[in-house]
Image (cartoon, rainbow, N blue to C red):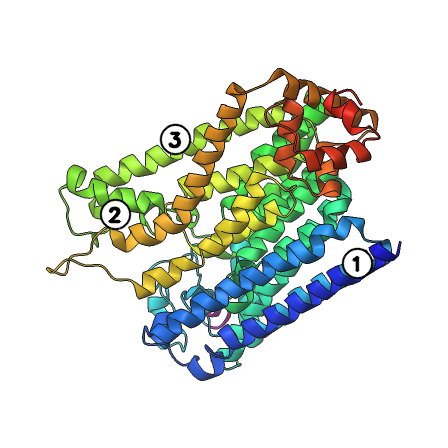
Amino acid sequence: MANNLIRSWVCLCWIVICALTITLLSHYGFASRYSLDQYGDRPRQSIGMLTDSSNEGAYWYIGSMVLLFTMYAFGYWKGVRSSVHFSSAYQRWALALIIVGGIVFCLALLPMYPVDGSDIYDYIIRGRMSAVYGLNPLEHVPDQIMRDMFYRFASWHRTPSAYGPAWELLAHTVSTLTATSNRNQQVIAYKLVAIAGYGLTALFVGLTLRRVAPRRLLIGLYLFMWNPLVVYMTAGTGHNDALMTACIALALYCLSRRWYVAATLGATIGLLIKFIPALFIPIIALVALRDLGTRRWLRYMLLSMFLGGVLAVIMYTPYWHGWDTLRAERRALMYTGSVATVMRHWLMPILDGVTDLTTSARNTPNSRTILANGTLALFGIFYLTQLVMLWRKHDSLTPIRITARIMLAYLLVASLWFHAWYVIWLIALVALLEDTPLRRLALVFSYLVTWQAFLYNYISIQTRSDQWLPWLDLVPVAIYMGYAWGYIVWYQITNRLRWQRLYLEDRAVGERLQAARGALGLTLSDLSDEMAIHYDYLEQYEQGKRPLRLDHGRALAQRLNLSLEDLLGTKA
């Protein structure tokens, strides 16, 4: 008892130490170095521009990010990873620390200039277009208000908004309330909206875990709320992705409670912010079909279509200007930060006879068509295989796993236009998962993508004739996309090799392990959370694809009320 008490206090101390360190790093590494008060009058600044691409600026950025993720890892391994063994009182303390820590981190980055992306200024100028000038941001463009104080700060001057009416209504409201405020105050107001999305996402992640995996509640909240990429891109640079992510998290929470209509409406609201939640509506519909039967499913579909249609009509009405309102072609012609971007650079000279890598995709129709259709076909095939898997597996966590896999596949394959803050979508999903390879990959990926903006801003590789080389995109893409693809290929190869090395004794151990677990009514997810053993290890032990480690064997035998000899099938 005394040992558990001391262990709990040590874990809480680690959480506090990591929180203090992350707060200091956020302030001194980013907020004070790139202060909104100091640089707020400079439009479209990157870290490279604010530091004159100096070595000192590079060291500060790289070092601060490394230390942030190091403390994030320490907080997990030394603090919350063992929280399943805490008493209820210590779990409440840990929960309070996680929530307060997330709030403090956001507040620490709130005064930071939104470097390496002008999205927040695009949000503001379009909010002002409707709130101040009476224009329609889904029809009109910022070039029509060139004298506005945010015009120089926005990037997309000649195109209507790429976001849906739900976001534009919210932006209209915020700009109406802050129309007379100074520029920096309006930036802070929009950052607070993004932070509200972060808070709502954390709320629905917690509610979902409380229902489907309560042992993992603290771990899941920690992995999302303390993730440095999530906090940096939300509170530091003010991206609105956390609001859309909150809608996905809401949909998954409602799905876990079998509130199928509410889940569909949650995804629909997210769809009216950004189109990504459209990927998850078929998942909700398929789970509903499996659980409700045909007749009740038809009622669900009719009610969801009616309510979703009413919601869309209400939100689109202020902005409707014909079917052109629904256009989404802008991103179809844009390539950056993706594997397809690098492939396009190599295909352009062959298929389009173009060697200038700065050429617009509009002027390279052959390579553009092959890449757009090819990536869409690959993603579609994967999507369908995941739907088949969803239909066959009935446990409550399968929809979450399928959703996370589809999201990762979209980011790695179908997203021709990729930015680091898109990974926020994935982190919210893997925070709901067990300790699986997918979760581990996503967390490492969230660190690697922090190199994207830095490498694009600091590295410039050209020929002596001033022509860009493919390495302009290849270097950053190879770092974060290369790792992700390499990990996936490595995992698939090693998994297949384990099938070929399947030994009868390992299979027999797996059968005894599965029988003992089933007798106690435990799921693999429960066992993984309680024993702090990788979920995929437990799955492979039961399938006989991995020899049982002796330390895991002792721990599992004790938990499953077996002797080690009985579990291994050896004589005492």
Q: Check residue 130 for magenta coloring.
A: yes
Residue in view at x 35 percent, y 60 percent: 455
Residue at image mark 3: 377
In depth, the one of 369 and 127 nearer the eye is 369
Residue numbers of the magenta segment: 128-132
As measured in the structure, the alpha-carbon distance from the residue carrying label 3 to the one carrying label 2 is: 19 Å
Q: Secondary structure at mark 2?
A: helix
Q: Position of residue 247 (x, y in %)?
A: 61, 50
- Mark 2 Cα-neighbour bin, 10 Å: few <14, some 14–19, many ≥20: some
Left or right: 42 as drawn, with respect to 105: left
User: In what quadrant of the picture does the C terminus appear?
Assistant: top right
> If you read the primary sequence from the N terminus, does the residue marked by circle 1 or circle 3 appear first?
1
As measured in the structure, the alpha-carbon distance from the residue carrying label 1 to the one carrying label 3 is: 50 Å
Residue at image mark 2: 361
Q: Position of residue 457 (x, y in %)?
A: 33, 65
Amino acid type at circle 2 is Ala
Residue in view at x 75 percent, y 39 percent: 257
Vertical position of residue 478 compared to residue 515: above or below: below
Vertical position of residue 202 compared to residue 487: above or below: below
Vertical position of residue 447 compared to residue 114: above or below: above
Any part of residue 106 in sight: no
Amino acid type at circle 3 is Ala
Q: Check residue 307 for magenta coloring.
A: no
Residue in view at x 73 percent, y 64 percent: 97
Left or right: 350 as drawn, with respect to 301: left
Any part of residue 544 in sight: yes
As measured in the structure, the alpha-carbon distance from the residue carrying label 2 to the one carrying label 1 is: 57 Å
- Mark 3 Cα-neighbour bin, 10 Å: few <14, some 14–19, many ≥20: some
Amino acid type at circle 1 is Ser
Q: Secondary structure at mark 3?
A: helix
Q: Which mark is residue 8?
A: 1
